[in-house]
Image (cartoon, grey):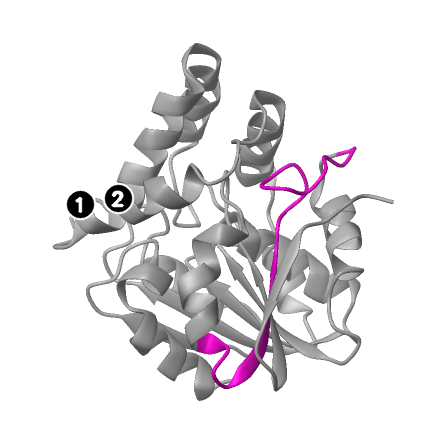
Amino acid sequence: MIKVHKEVYGRGKAIVLIHGWAMHTGIWRPFAQQLAQNYQVTCLDVPGHGLSEVVEPFTLEKISGVLIDETPDTPFCLLGWSLGASIAITMAKQYPDRIDSLICLAGNPKFTQTKDWPGMQVQLLEEFAENLQLSCQSTLLRFLTLQVHSLTNGKKLLKQLKSAIHECEPPTETVLKQALEILKRADLREDIATLKCALMIIQGDKDTLVPLQTGHGIQKLPCKSELSIISGAGHVPFLSHSSELIQIMRGFV
C-alpha cells in the first residue's frame, strides 16, 4: 500500500485539498487553518510529492485511486489547485458517490493551448521538462515566479512559495517530468461534462498560467457549473486572497 501523507484540521463538513505541481501540503497550511474554523479540512500530498511515496504508473487514474483511500468516509467537497484540479476532476469522475461537490481552483481541464481552447503554450511546458535536467532548483524557481508575475504583492508571495516548497525535498526529476507530461497531454473536458457533482470554477483575473477565458470555456461545456473570478489574484489565490476565496467557498460548499 502506498504511503500518503495528510494533514487534517478542524471539524464540520469535510473539504479535501489537493495541491499543484512540485508542491506539497505545506503550501496549504495557513489557508487550511483559516478554513478549518468552519470545516474539517484534509490536505493530501500527491504521490511522489512532499512525504508521499511514489506511485507507478504515474497517471491521473492511479493517483486518484491512491488518494481516495485517504479521504473522509462521508461525501466531501474536493478542491484541486492547478495540477491538483486535474487530479480532482478525475477523482470526481471515478468516485461519484464519494464527492458531492468539486472546486477547480486555477485549474484547466486541458492545460495546453490549442486553436479551440485557452491554455499554456506546449513549448513552455516542454522547456520546463528540458530545463529540469540542467537545474531542478532554477526551473522550480522560474515556475514559482510565473505564479505571482505582475501581482502588486508578488515579492511577498514568492517568498511564501519558496519557504513552503523548501520545507520538503522536491520531487524527483522523474516525477516532475511525469507530472508535466500529464499537464501536456490530459484533456478532461469530456470528463467535466459528465460529472454528477456540483462544480465551481475559481480563477484569478491576473493568472498567467491559466487564462481567464478558461472558466468561460468550461461554462460552454454541457455541464452545470458556477464561475467566480477573484479580482487582482494570480495563480495562488489561497495565499494572496484567502478571505475572498473562503467567502466564495462558503457560498458553494
**Crowdedness near tag 2: few (<14), some (14–19) or many (≥20) residues, C-alpha within 10 Å:** few
> Magenta segment, which residues?
35-57
**Image quadrant of residue 44?**
bottom right
Of the pair 136 and 216, the residue shown nearer to us:
136
Q: Residue at x 48, y 68 (%)?
A: 32
Q: Amino acid at mark 1?
A: Lys
**Main SS type for the magenta part?**
loop
Image location of residue 94, percent across then percent down: 78, 61
- Quarter occupied by the C terminus: bottom right
| Direction from residue 187 to residue 115 in the image, left or right | left
Residue 70's x, y, as percent?
Answer: 75, 61
Residue 197 shows in the view = yes
- C-alpha separation, residue under disc 2 versus residue under disc 1: 6 Å
Is residue 113 at least partly visible in the picture? no
| Depicted 41 relative to depicted 83: above or below | below
Tag 1's secondary structure? helix
Q: Are marks 2 and 1 in contact (CB under 8 Å)?
A: yes
**Direction left: furthest residue:** 152
In the rendered image, residue 152, in percent from the top left (x then y), is placed at 12, 55
Q: What numbered label is drawn on residue 159?
A: 2
Residue sticking out furthest to the right:
1
Disc sitting over residue 155 in the figure: 1
Badge 2 amino acid: Lys
Front residue of 253/39: it is 39
17 in relation to 45, above or below: below
- Report the front residue among 237 and 156: 156
* Picture coordinates of residue 125, whole percent (x, y): 44, 30
Q: Is residue 25 magenta?
A: no
Residue at 50% from the left image edge and 48% from the top image edge: 20
- Circle 2 SS class: helix
**In the picture, which quadrant includes the N terminus?**
top right
- At a point 44% along the width and 21% down the height, the residue shown is 136
